């Protein structure tokens, strides 16, 4: 066992972690190391061979590997060190952590600051309590995506997709490209879970049936999936008797939500937000442990990877400043509250240290002009619509925060119809 000491440690080499490494180096940290349990860099984007990445960052439409290649090249140029095949298996409350590598063994890492960038994982069938046996042929959409795009295996030939998250929509199209029959996409909510562009490009363009207010109520088959029972649901999301029907299939793909991966965050003693499932952070991406920062889908599940990278860069920069004793101290704190039609938001509190962007998702869609606002006159913008699958932004200047009356302790964000 060896102890190593570095300036900034980043856990996870997906889009948030790679960008955090760059941010840390460009902010002046000398020894920046990104730890990755996989054998390669890039995280989930390794398997995302479809286009649609980088429109905001690079003003081009790139595939996932192309997008990550640009960031990884930049990271190498900045002098970021990567350690792949390295699992972080324990964190201590002082921010140090333990790694395991097949060649280097176990190491205890001490860093001036940490950036958590572990991303998120998909909810499995057990999480949604669908009755029936557990035959072969049931996969999360991301697992199926890896099989098809990286391993060269077809999960099956007759497919049902449960949930309309973006990976599920993209995999519905991908399975058709590979010659499978897609019997339908079934979504329990009354609105799509993914981006509207993916509904159009992945389902509408290929004639794949899309059923809102529907769910799978049973899986059938012993050794191999033979079909599923689907039913319409009521306003309480309970199946309506008499609406059940059997759909023959040999493959069920699940796109029923993503969960921020925060086992290490909890070990570090970081406060976890009960709604987002990610660490509570401020606009500097600083958690409730002042030497621990977090960014990307480990904090809140973003709709675009461009925002994940941007937040990762910011977290890395601020982690480096903290490690170098250059991060300005907060003199005031403002708790952020979700008001009218706001379900998820991040950050959860603001300091007066730097400008802030609050990312938020609405609870239900508004298909007409609406306004997103932050109270005390801090922000107001008119939107053409607001949908749960797409994030909205609130921008607040640090100078505005410093000018608020001394008795202001909270800032509420709302999305309301005009």
Image (cartoon, rainbow, N blue to C red):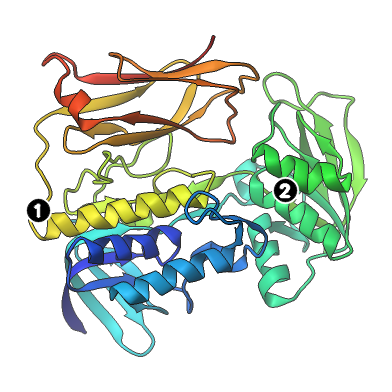
Q: In this rendered view, identify the residue nearer to me: 183 or 226.
A: 183
Q: Position of residue 227 (x, y in %)?
A: 87, 51
Question: Which residue extends farthest front?
Answer: 59
- The foreground one among 53 and 282 is 53
Task: Kindly tell me whether residue 163 is visible in this rendering.
Answer: no
Residue 63 is situated, as x and y percent measured from the top left of the image, at 61, 63
Tell me the CA gap for discs 2 and 1. 44 Å
Q: Residue furthest top?
A: 418
> Mark 2 or mark 1, which has the lower sequence index?
2
Q: Is residue 99 above or below residue 235?
A: below
Contact (CB < 8 A) between labels 2 and 1? no
Task: Tell me the residue at 31%/65% (across/down).
Answer: 21
For the residue carrying disc 2, how many other residues have a C-alpha within 10 Å: few (<14), some (14-19), or many (20+)?
many
Pinpoint residue 275: horizontal percent, then vertical percent.
43, 33
The quadrant holding residue 406 is: top left
Q: Which residue is mark 1?
A: 326
Q: Residue at x 89, y 64 (%)?
A: 179
In the rendered image, the quadrant that contains the N terminus is: bottom left
Count residues near mark 1 (Cα–Cα under 10 Å), then give few for <14, some for 14-19, many for 20+.
few
Q: Residue 243 occupies which quadrant of the picture?
A: top right
**Residue in the picture at 78% in, 52% down:** 172
Q: Disc 2 vs disc 1: which is toward the camera?
A: 1
- Indicate the secondary structure of the residue bearing disc 2: helix
Residue that extends furthest to the bottom in the rendered view of this protein: 103
Element at badge 1?
Answer: loop
Residue 121 visible here: yes
> Is 59 situated above or below 193?
below
| Quarter placement of the C terminus | top right
Q: Would residue 187 be found to the left or right of residue 407 on screen?
A: right
User: Which residue occupies 35% across, 78% down?
Assistant: 83
Pointer 2 residue: 169
């Amino acid at each position: 066992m060896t102890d190593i000491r570095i300036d900034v440690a980043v856990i996870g080499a997906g889009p948030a972690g790679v960008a955090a490494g760059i941010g840390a180096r460009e902010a002046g940290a000398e020894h920046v190391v990104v730890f990755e349990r996989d054998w390669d860099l890039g995280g989930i984007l390794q398997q995302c061979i479809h286009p649609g990445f980088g429109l905001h960052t690079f003003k081009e439409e790139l595939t996932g590997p192309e997008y990550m290649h640009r960031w990884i090249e930049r990271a190498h140029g900045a002098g970021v060190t990567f350690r792949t095949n390295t699992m972080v298996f324990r964190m201590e409350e002082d921010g140090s952590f333990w790694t395991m590598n097949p060649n280097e063994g176990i190491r205890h890492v001490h860093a001036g600051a940490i950036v958590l960038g572990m991303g998120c994982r998909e909810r499995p069938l057990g999480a949604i309590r669908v009755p029936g046996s557990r035959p072969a042929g049931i996969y999360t959409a991301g697992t199926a995506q890896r099989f098809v795009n990286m391993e060269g295996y077809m999960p099956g030939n007759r497919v049902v997709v449960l949930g309309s998250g973006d990976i599920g929509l993209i995999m519905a199209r991908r399975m058709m490209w590979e010659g499978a029959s897609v019997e339908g996409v079934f979504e329990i909510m009354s609105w799509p879970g993914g981006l509207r562009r993916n509904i159009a490009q992945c389902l509408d363009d290929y004639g794949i049936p899309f059923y809102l207010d529907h769910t799978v109520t049973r899986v059938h088959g012993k050794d191999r999936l033979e079909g599923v029972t689907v039913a319409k649901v009521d306003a309480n999301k309970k199946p309506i008797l008499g609406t059940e029907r059997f759909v023959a299939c040999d493959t069920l793909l699940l796109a029923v939500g993503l969960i921020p991966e925060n086992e290490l965050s909890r070990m570090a003693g970081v406060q976890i937000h009960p709604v987002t499932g990610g660490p509570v952070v401020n606009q500097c991406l600083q958690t409730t442990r002042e030497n621990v920062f977090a960014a990307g889908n480990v904090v809140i599940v973003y709709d675009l990877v461009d925002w994940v990278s941007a937040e990762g860069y910011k977290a890395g920069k601020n982690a480096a400043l903290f490690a170098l004793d250059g991060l300005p101290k907060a003199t005031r704190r403002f708790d952020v509250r979700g008001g009218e039609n706001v379900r998820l938001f991040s950050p959860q509190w603001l300091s007066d240290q730097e400008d802030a962007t609050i990312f938020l998702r609405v609870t239900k869609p508004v298909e007409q002009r609406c306004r997103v606002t932050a109270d005390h006159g801090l922000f107001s913008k008119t939107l053409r619509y607001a949908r749960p699958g797409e994030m909205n932004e609130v921008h607040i200047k640090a100078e505005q925060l410093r000018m608020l009356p001394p008795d202001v302790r909270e800032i509420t964000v709302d999305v309301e119809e005009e």
